[in-house]
């Protein structure tokens, strides 16, 4: 069997910049790939790298696509997918997802049972935004910390906790932006709200794994790894080093879907699946994995529609 292969770069401006400890993010760029089989069936995949999070760059993804022929046999495409190096995890996800779509019938795919976590803006703006998301049905919220002065953020947290309905849950995401003292201060604070704070995400930088492991054993508030497990190789390494708390997995940059399935099914890890601000193409592939592998029923981090005009962009 032969496949026609093509790709294009796309970009979408956020309705409001995404502000994290890594900086200000204003435009989402990705690569859309298309495969057409001999029967004319079309399948799409998305390569949506975040280089500052641990994946390849957009330029590296484009270079990889440019090296491929425009007509690919089934034998060659399997070989291509198997040989995509681990340093190109977003490419692994995009190509393998596209091939799976050609080989499987997704009409019965249902991920509507999943609960979603809504992403709040950093700083005081969160106090004015959670109500809109609550009205849309969100019961779990994610708030970026480590962006402003810690005294100011802790004061905002108090106000947010007071405002949120009793049934709401709050996740705090530091994106690795805290030092040891700040992390302890946040965890001490969160331990006062055991029924409200679900977890703190990546309080310390990636190179502080042992410190995060120690903190996870000392405080009752759960810690979730995110940047530390950006790719499948990192995920496996952290598990081997003893991490048994929460893993935040971003399917769009983690790497091979089939290898991820095998790892999650083998180890039954506590996992939260999360968006990389992909289009509807990458979102569908990512949510397919979330529906298959979210055994603990934690809300998935795909409540980001409000960061794009209208809805998640289609192409």
Image (tube, helix red, strand yellow):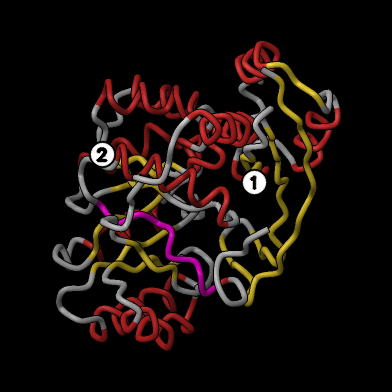
> Residue 291, position in %: x, y?
32, 44
State whether residue 223 is above or below residue 147: above
Viewer-side residue, 119 vs 286: 286
Would residue 205 appear left or right of 23 to someone viewing this image? left
Q: Describe residue 53's horizontal placement relative to residue 7 as left or right.
A: left
Let me know if residue 59 is in the magenta part. Answer: no
Q: Is residue 301 magenta?
A: yes
Magenta residues (range): 298-306
Q: Residue furthest front?
A: 39
Quarter of the figure with residue 140: bottom left
2 or 1: mark nearer the eye: 1
Q: Residue at x 50, y 23 (%)?
A: 233
Dot placed on the residue nearer the N-terminal end, 2 or 1: 1
| Position of residue 159 in the picture relative to residue 208 (left or right) | left
| SS at badge 1 | loop
Q: Which residue is mark 1?
A: 48
What residue appears at the point 38 percent right and 79 percent down from the top-left corner? 133
Q: Which residue is rendered at x = 35% and y = 63% of the image?
A: 117
Q: Which residue is mark 2?
A: 270
């Amino acid at each position: 069997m032969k496949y026609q292969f093509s790709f294009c770069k796309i970009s979408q401006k956020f309705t409001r910049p995404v502000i994290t400890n890594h900086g200000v993010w204003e435009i989402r760029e990705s690569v859309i790939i298309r495969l057409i089989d001999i029967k004319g069936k079309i399948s799409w995949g998305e390569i949506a790298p975040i280089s500052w999070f641990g994946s390849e760059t957009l330029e590296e993804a484009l270079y990889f696509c440019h090296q491929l022929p425009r007509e690919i046999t089934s034998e060659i495409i399997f070989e291509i997918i198997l040989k995509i190096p681990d340093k190109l995890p977003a490419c692994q996800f995009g190509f393998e997802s596209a091939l799976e779509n050609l080989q499987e019938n997704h009409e019965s795919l249902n991920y509507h049972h999943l609960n979603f976590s809504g992403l709040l803006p950093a700083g005081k703006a969160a106090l004015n935004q959670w109500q809109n998301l609550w009205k849309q049905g969100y019961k779990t919220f994610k708030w970026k910390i480590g962006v402003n002065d810690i005294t100011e953020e802790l004061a905002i947290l108090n106000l947010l906790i007071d405002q949120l309905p009793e049934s709401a849950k709050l996740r705090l995401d530091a994106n690795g932006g805290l030092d040891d003292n700040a992390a302890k201060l946040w965890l001490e604070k969160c331990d006062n709200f055991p029924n409200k704070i679900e977890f703190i995400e990546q309080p310390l930088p990636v190179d502080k794994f042992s410190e995060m492991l120690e903190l996870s054993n000392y405080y009752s508030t759960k810690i979730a790894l995110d940047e530390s497990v950006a790719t499948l190789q990192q995920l496996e390494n952290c598990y081997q080093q003893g991490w048994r708390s929460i893993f935040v997995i971003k399917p769009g940059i983690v790497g091979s879907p089939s290898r991820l399935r095998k790892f999650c099914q083998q180890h039954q890890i506590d996992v939260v699946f999360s968006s990389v601000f992909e289009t509807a193409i990458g979102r569908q592939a990512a949510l397919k994995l979330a529906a298959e592998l979210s055994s603990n029923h934690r809300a998935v981090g795909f409540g980001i529609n409000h960061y794009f005009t209208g809805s998640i962009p289609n192409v």
